[in-house]
């Protein structure tokens, strides 16, 4: 029995294999998935629908190449908030900024950690000015990504 099975008894090994395969290639057909897990396509279709209904699959997406789209700079911005900050309003305002890809509420001195992508350092500077003008923001700290030697692109399911 795998560690995942001990953590979540709702999923069996076939479900985990289907989730892993879909995470690697969301465009897989039911026939392709069936051949990977040793079932017939209609059985895989039923399992995928159940996994979607139960919330294990939140959606399907294409992974775009930011560089090819002219977004050459990735950075992580730590957001330090004021004591009177309304977190719901604050995160709504940040999520309206298209450069912000992810917002994480974190433990530690900062309240939030944001992953951002911009065209250039000038574009990042403009974004930081907008961030600093956001009600509830006390200050920011920015870490610019130089390279990304590894990206999992999902979660480990086995």
Image: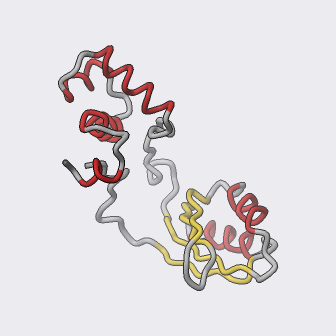
Identified at 73% across, 83% down, the residue is: 138
How many callouts does the rendering have?
0
Q: Residue at x 35, y 41 (%)?
A: 23
Which one is nearer the viewer's eye here, 57 or 22?
57
Q: Position of residue 122 (x, y in %)?
A: 62, 70
The correct choice, above or below, for 77 with respect to 27 in the image is below
Picture layout, residue 146 above or below residue 34: below
Determine the image quadrant of residue 86.
bottom right
Determine whether 149 is above or below 68 in the image: below
Place of residue 55 in the rendered image (x, y in percent of width and height, measured from the top left): 50, 38
Farthest bottom residue in view: 109
- Residue 95 placement, left or right of 75: right
Give left or right: position of 32 versus 65. Answer: left
Q: Looking at the picture, does residue 157 appear above or below residue 27?
A: below
x and y percent of residue 95 in the render? 68, 57
Q: Quadrant of residue 11?
A: top left
Residue visible at 61% across and 59% down in the picture = 100
61 horizontally vs 11: left or right: right
Residue 88, percent from left and from top: 75, 62
């Amino acid at each position: 029995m795998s560690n995942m099975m001990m953590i979540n008894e709702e999923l069996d090994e076939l479900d985990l294999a289907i989730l892993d395969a879909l995470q690697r290639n969301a465009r897989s057909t039911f026939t392709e998935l069936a051949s990977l897990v040793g079932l017939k396509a209609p059985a895989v279709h039923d399992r995928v629908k159940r996994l979607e209904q139960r919330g294990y699959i939140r959606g399907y997406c294409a992974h775009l190449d930011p560089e090819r789209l002219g977004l050459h700079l990735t950075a992580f911005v730590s957001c330090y908030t004021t004591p009177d900050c309304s977190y719901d309003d604050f995160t709504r305002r940040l999520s309206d900024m298209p450069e912000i890809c992810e917002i994480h509420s974190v433990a530690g001195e900062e309240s939030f950690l944001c992953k951002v992508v911009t065209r250039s350092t000038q574009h990042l500077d403009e974004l930081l000015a907008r961030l600093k003008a956001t009600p509830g923001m006390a200050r920011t700290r920015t870490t610019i990504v130089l390279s990304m030697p590894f990206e999992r692109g999902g979660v480990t399911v086995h």
